[in-house]
């Protein structure tokens, strides 16, 4: 075996370990009953951390808020990005470069600056308008949506620009020459061509909105998104429920990736003419099983079945045994420590007298019946001896 093969194999192992190692570790720790995420020592297999995750009210409320904000961002950022891409494709080269720089600039601005500037700008506008408009504008949902749109729209625009570079503009010109209106040419020619890019842009903008923290933490005000709630939870201490969240995200990603792979392979087979020659597509049963919808349904059923079986697992007996074992070990350690202390006292010849007082000497021997001391003679001076027995002056003769 040559040195290059050995080096290449070692590099591949190191690369994939670095890439997938943390994911594998998080998946394993999600099923360990330990209160702290760890693999060793292994305590008990449990699925309770998933229930802990879904039972966190703050995280679930943040998840709902993130979905609402994400849908609003997608609904506005995708059309804005498409409009920007179409405008750039129609402008002269010099003006196009200038406008491209302006539209792409928000991506380069730190999210902290965008968040603070969004609050300042819309706070001034809402206070100027006053009334119900102020209440509608100056809230976490509105401010977060407009704050995220300022840079998320640029992501969508980049996707549309890449797609428009492959578009043949003569198709639109031919449609206009044949009597179609600009709106009809857009809906029937350009929009179907841009459909894959629209789906990609919507997915990218949704993810960008969902995972954003730097801008959202300023604009969300008293509300919270899933990202901000998660960051707050991590700040106060981590537990394996975060690993359970990672397992859910990985599962959703795998289901989506496998379904997309089925879609792409089926499309390639049909466009390349391989479907008619392939025995996989010739058989009605295997052809139905390879359909993307069926693949997605099978994956969902598998995930649902595993989740249901896992939810029925009871780890309370194992956890009780682990806890009792820990208590027994603590008792043994205390006994060993006590024996060591007593051995050292005997070796050094130290004898501690047992207190004779009540309560077993818990209060330093106090509490027993102490002998009564003889009463001190009462001072004969005035004021009950408060001034050291000094008597009042004798009356003058």
Image (spheres, helix red, strand yellow):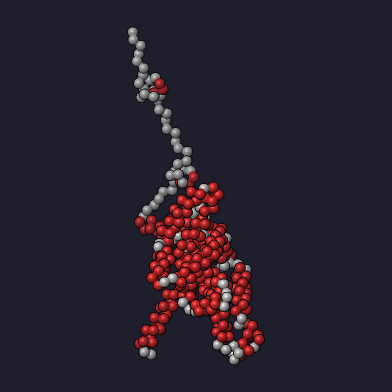
Relative to 203, say whether 68 is above or below: above
Quadrant of the rendered image containing residue 18: bottom left
Q: Residue furthest top?
A: 397
Quadrant of the rendered image containing residue 45: bottom right
> Which is nearer the eye, 394 or 316?
316
> Which is nearer the eye, 127 or 393?
127
| Figure quadrant of the C terminus | top left
Relative to 56, say whether 392 is above or below: above
Q: Residue furthest bottom?
A: 277
Q: Is residue 152 visible?
A: yes
> Which is nearer the eye, 117 or 83?
83
> Which is nearer the eye, 349 or 299?
299
Q: Position of residue 4 (x, y in %)?
A: 36, 87
Numbered-mark total: 0
Relative to 277, say whether 385 is above or below: above
In percent of the image, x 42 and y 80: which residue is there?
Answer: 13
Q: Is residue 256 visible?
A: no
Is residue 372 left or right of 395 when viewed as pictured?
right
| Figure quadrant of the N terminus | bottom left
In percent of the image, x 52 and y 57: which residue is there?
Answer: 142
Q: Position of residue 375 (x, y in %)?
A: 42, 28
In percent of the image, x 39 and y 67: which residue is there?
Answer: 98
Is residue 41 left or right of 298 when viewed as pictured?
left
Q: Position of residue 5 (x, y in %)?
A: 38, 87
In percent of the image, x 52 and y 50: which residue is there?
Answer: 134
Q: Position of residue 396 (x, y in %)?
A: 34, 10
Q: Residue furthest right?
A: 284
């Amino acid at each position: 075996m040559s040195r290059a093969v050995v080096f290449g194999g070692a590099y591949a192992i190191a690369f994939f370990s670095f890439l997938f190692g943390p994911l594998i570790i998080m998946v394993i720790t999600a099923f360990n009953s330990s209160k702290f995420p760890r693999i060793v020592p292994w305590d008990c297999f449990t699925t309770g951390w998933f229930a802990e995750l879904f039972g966190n009210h703050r995280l679930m409320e943040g998840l709902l808020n993130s979905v609402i904000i994400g849908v609003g961002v997608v609904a506005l950022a995708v059309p804005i990005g498409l409009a920007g891409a179409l405008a750039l494709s129609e402008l002269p080269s010099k003006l196009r470069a200038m406008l491209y720089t302006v539209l792409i600039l928000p991506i380069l601005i730190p999210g902290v600056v965008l968040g603070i500037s969004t609050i300042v700008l819309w706070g001034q506008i809402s206070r100027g308008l006053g009334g119900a408009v102020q209440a509608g504008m100056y809230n976490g949902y509105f401010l977060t949506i407009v704050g995220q749109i300022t840079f998320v729209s640029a992501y969508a625009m980049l996707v549309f620009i890449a797609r428009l570079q492959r578009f043949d503009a003569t198709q639109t010109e031919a449609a206009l020459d044949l009597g179609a209106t600009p709106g009809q040419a857009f809906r029937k020619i350009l929009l179907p061509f841009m459909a894959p890019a629209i789906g990609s842009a919507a997915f990218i903008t949704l993810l960008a909105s969902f995972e954003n923290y730097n801008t959202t933490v300023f604009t969300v005000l008293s509300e919270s998104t899933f990202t901000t709630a998660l960051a707050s939870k991590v700040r106060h201490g981590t537990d394996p429920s975060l690993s359970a969240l990672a397992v859910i995200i990985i599962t959703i990603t795998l289901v989506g990736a496998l379904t997309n792979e089925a879609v792409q392979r089926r499309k390639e087979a049909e466009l390349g003419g391989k479907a008619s020659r392939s025995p996989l597509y010739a058989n009605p049963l295997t052809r139905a099983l390879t359909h993307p919808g069926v693949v997605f349904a099978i994956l969902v059923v598998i995930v649902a079945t595993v989740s249901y079986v896992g939810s029925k697992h009871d780890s309370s007996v194992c956890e009780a045994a682990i806890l009792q074992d820990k208590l027994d070990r603590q008792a043994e350690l205390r006994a060993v420590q006590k024996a060591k202390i007593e051995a050292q006292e005997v070796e050094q010849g130290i004898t501690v007298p047992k207190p004779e007082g009540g309560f077993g000497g818990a209060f330093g021997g106090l509490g027993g019946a102490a002998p009564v001391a003889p009463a001190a003679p009462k001072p004969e001076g005035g004021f009950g001896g408060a001034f050291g027995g000094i008597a009042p002056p004798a009356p003058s003769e």
